[in-house]
Image (cartoon, grey):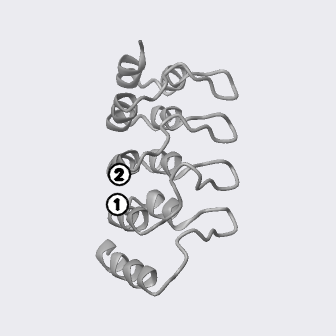
Amino acid sequence: MEQGHNRVVRELVKNGASTNSADSRGYTPLHLASLKGHTGICRQLLSNGATDPNTAEDSEGWTPLHVACTSVSFPSVLHLITHHADVNALNSGKATPLHLAAQHSCVPIVKALLLNGADRTLLDSSGSTAVNVAHLKSSHHIMKISSP
C-alpha cells in the first residue's frame, strides 16, 4: 500500500504541491508519514524540500520525530535522525522523543536516540526523566539502557 502512496506523493511533489501545508491539527505531510510509519514517503518529503523536521511542529509542539516515536516506527525514526531531526526537541509538555520512546517501551528507538545524542537528564513538565517514565511503565529494559 505504501508503494501506491509513494507514487501519489511523487506526482504531487512533481506537480508543485506544497509539502509544508498543515491540517487543522498542525500536522504536515511529514508528521502524517511519520505517524503511519511510511519511511519511503518521509524520505521523499525530506529530499524534496519538506519542512525541516525540527521546525515542522504541530499545535502541541510535536515534531515528526515525536510522532514517529509514539507510533513506534523505528525506520521513520532512523530516517528523521539521518536528516538531522533534533533528538532533544521539547513538545508543549516538555517531553522529548526519548520520553515518548520510553513511554512506549521501544528499546530500539531508545537506543537509537541515545546513540544520537539524546539527553537522558531532561525533565518533562511533570519533572520526570525518560528513566522515570520507563519505571512508571515497568519497562526494565528501557530503565537499564537509559540509566547513566
Vertical comparison of 73 with 86: above or below? below
Q: Residue at x 56, y 38 (%)?
A: 89
Q: Residue at x 65, y 34 (%)?
A: 94
Identified by mark 2, the residue type is: His
Farthest residue, direction left: 3
Vertical comparison of 45 with 122: above or below? below
Q: Residue at x 62, y 23 (%)?
A: 123
Farthest residue, direction top: 148
Residue at numbered disc 1 = 39
Q: Badge 2 local density, few (<14 within 10 Å), some, or many (20+)?
A: some
How far is mark 1 from mark 2, CA to CA?
Answer: 7 Å
Mark 1 and mark 2 lie on one chain; the one further toward the N terminus is 1
Residue at numbered disc 2 = 79
Quadrant (top left, top right, bottom left, bottom right) of the N terminus: bottom left
Front residue (pair 114, 25): 114
Q: Is residue 59 left or right of residue 95?
A: right
Q: Residue at x 49, y 22 (%)?
A: 120
Q: Which mark is residue 93?
A: none
Front residue (pair 118, 134): 118
- Whether tag 1 and tag 2 are in contact, CB under 8 A, the answer is yes
Q: Secondary structure at mark 2?
A: helix
Identified by mark 1, the residue type is: Thr
Front residue (pair 74, 22): 22
